[in-house]
Image (cartoon, grey):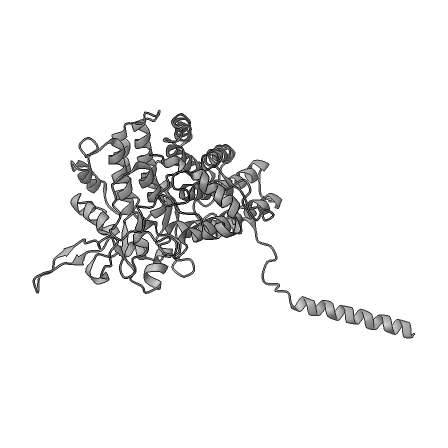
Amino acid sequence: MKKIFAIIIIFLVFASCTKLEDLNKNIKDPTTVSGESLFTGAQKNLFDQMVSSNVNFNITRLIDQYWTETTYTDESNYDLVDRTIPDHHWDVLYRDVLMDLKESAKVIEATTYLNDASPAVKTARLKVVDVLAVYAWSILVESFGNIPYSEALDVTKLTPKYDDGLTIYKDLISRLSTDIAAIGAVSGSVIDGDNMYGGEAASWVKFANSLKLRMGMLLSKADLTYAKGIVEEAVSGGVFTSNGDNARLVYLSSQPNTNPIYNDLVASQRHDFVPANTIVDMMNTLSDPRRPYYFTLIDTSTVQGVVKLAYVGGVYGASNDFTLYSHVADKIQEPTFEALILDYAEVEFLLAEGVGREFAITGTAEEHYNKAISASIIYWGGTQGEADVYLANPDVAYTTAAGTYLEKIGKQFWLALYNRGLESWTEWRFLDAPVLTAPPDALSALPIRYTYPTKEQTLNGANYSAASTALGEDGDAVTTHLFWDKP
């Protein structure tokens, strides 16, 4: 009897402990995260990094001379180190985008989807994830050059080697080709949680081909024959044909899902930036119809009682009084303002450049140039009539504007990429137009790459040193030309 009683007591104690442990479980939260949720998060992190104006994360609007600073001018004068800006850029893309996309693909691969009509749908789902990863990888290569790739994202390799930038870039393009074929084999929506295209396969094929076009064109200096083949493949596969194809993310009205620019310029209640005179003066000279969508008017009255409004940019690189200059347009500062990572205007400028390089592309360089400018003006809120007037300006018209075809395209490309700092920085470095001048107090010439994160020097020293040497020229410096930007 005593034994039976003891057994009962032990059972009750065990049962009680089990119930107590259960009290520590949060039954309202899922124990696993879906692959689609990881994809959604990575996508937003990517857009946030690309569109951010926070001086800790992305200063390319300052490097591009679209904006300049008011009180603190360090970043306008190319101080990348004090705020460890390259470190943040590196961390976000590797940790918050690429690692999450890797995990997303891993979870999707292990998940059984009851509503999939065929294995091809699941394959397409995985390839959509890979297309976004290719985009993120391309930004890293374009920013730094040689980077960890083949040994990256592996938690067992704490000191990954750096791979050759050109080799990585060509591998990424090869991945895109495979992705395009797989996604193009299905139709309809193939992935939930996609805030760019709602998972629509046809839209992702267009995006992947347009990205392939951009990457192929960027290799024109490094390997012209290869670039020609890739560009022509991309165009024949189907690229963007209207603003409706733009790769965009629409932000929400409440934080933390508002546009980062709203967070940086409005919610922060800081007045750190004004448009730079570099772009404002150029657009004033050209009577550019996009000015009211880019900047605000400022009262420049010199006589009491007389109101005289104009677009006035702050002196680039200098300290500027926020009250005396135009500001970033109100539309851009709205919490719901959408972000772009690739658009139709960009595609048309690339096609114009491709025709100029004598690639097999239908249409003339002038036709694509005109379509690009029109697409940009209309996207921002202008009309085709305004675009036609602008294109008739002898300083804008393709046949009469000054410079080589690359200088003409580069100048208008730069104007169209306003508010897309990282992409503009890449195209400006590649096309060498327009001519931008470093301010008098700049710490260096205009940066043409990001330096490697400072922590790489201490945590991955041997591989960092080898990568720096492999870059040539000045090594790990902002003035070293990358493989795709050789003069």
Q: Residue at x 57, y 51 (%)?
A: 34
Query: Quarter holding the C terminus?
Result: top left
Q: In this rendering, does residue 39 appear at all?
A: yes
Q: In this rendering, does residue 373 appear at all?
A: no
Residue 173 appears left or right of 383? right
Looking at the picture, does residue 31 appear above or below residue 476? below
- In this view, the residue farthest toward the right is 1
Looking at the picture, does residue 417 appear above or below residue 299? above
Q: Quadrant of residue 218?
A: top left
Q: Residue at x 57, y 41 (%)?
A: 116
Residue 441 appears left or right of 82? left
> Where residue 46 appears, x then y in whole percent?
44, 49
Q: Nearer the viewer, residue 162 or 152?
A: 162
> Where residue 23 appears, x then y in whole percent?
66, 69
- Please state the total of marks drawn on the protein image: 0
Looking at the picture, does residue 425 appear above or below residue 224? below
> Where residue 79 appears, x then y in whole percent?
34, 53
> Where residue 409 appears, x then y in whole percent?
27, 36
Looking at the picture, does residue 368 appear above or below residue 442? above
Q: Nearer the viewer, residue 428 or 20?
A: 428
Query: Quarter holding the N terminus?
Result: bottom right
Q: Residue at x 33, y 37 (%)?
A: 430
